[in-house]
Amino acid sequence: MKLKPYVFSAMALAATTCFVILIGGDRLLWSQDAQPKAKVGENLQVLEFDNMVDLQNYMKGLTEALGVNCKFCHDLMDFPKDDPKLHKLTARKFMTMVKGLNEGFFKDMDEKVTCFTCHQGRKEPVNSKAELMKIQEEEAKN
Ligand code: HEC
Ligand code: HEC
């Protein structure tokens, strides 16, 4: 049987339409996948978290690593605010450094650097054994 030209072009049109829908649909799915996940935080310039629980756990870790409270870095009425009187801006610089180290020098290493690696629960890291012994003596007096 010979197809009449108009039947043939109708079939071709239908096939093309299906193809376009498939490709189009695929592209739509793909672009949804490629979109960054909904992140939390209004003013996160270095860190990224998928949810508030992860963010809070990280922040709790910071207080332990430096032996401080949230208010060492934050205006407790306004966490996203960058208050230059507090230590948030300094902390962000250190976060940038740590991220750089872990994505660079430590990329292929099992252990990564954290704030705790240097700070060990103190605002100012201890840089020598002599300094540590002095601190421990003072702590023993109290
Ligand atoms: C040593 C400083 C430091 C301490 C301590 C700290 N934070 Fe943060 N926090 C930061 C920095 C810096 C950022 C912003 C990070 C960035 O820019 O990626 C931040 C971001 C946040 C944000 C996101 C705000 C936004 O942009 O929406 C919240 C919420 C937050 N901290 C809560 C806390 C809580 C709660 C505590 C105490 C348990 C705490 N932080 C302790 C430094 C600190
Ligand atoms: C490679 C070691 C190292 C790491 C890792 C490190 N710090 Fe520090 N940090 C230091 C040193 C050393 C100082 C003291 C610098 C000075 O005397 O000015 C310091 C000082 C600070 C201060 C100022 C404290 C004050 O009393 O004024 C803040 C805030 C701070 N670090 C936050 C962080 C945070 C947050 C992280 C993790 C994201 C971090 N640091 C990771 C070495 C480190």
Image: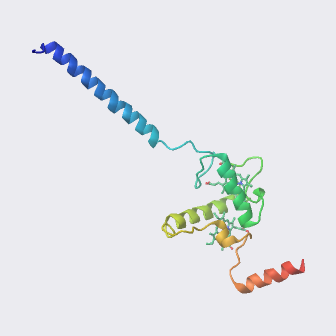
Looking at the rendered image, the quarter that the C terminus falls into is bottom right
- The quadrant in which residue 69 appears is bottom right
Front residue of 109 and 86: 109
Instruction: Give the side of residue 31 with respect to residue 96, left or right.
Output: left
Instruction: Give the side of residue 141 with respect to residue 130, left or right.
Output: right
Q: Where is residue 116 shown, x and y percent of the image?
A: 67, 68
Quadrant hosting ligand 1? bottom right
x 74%, y 63%: residue: 64
Residue at the right extreme?
A: 142
Q: Where is residue 90 shown, x and y percent of the image?
A: 66, 63
State whether residue 3 is above or below residue 64. above
- The quadrant in which residue 99 appears is bottom right
Q: Where is residue 7 shown, x and y percent of the image?
A: 17, 14
x 65%, y 71%: residue: 117
- The quadrant in which residue 11 appears is top left
x 63%, y 48%: residue: 43
State whether residue 58 is above or below residue 33. below
Residue at the left extreme?
A: 2
Looking at the rendered image, the quarter that the N terminus falls into is top left
Instruction: Give the side of residue 32 with respect to residue 112, left or right.
Output: left
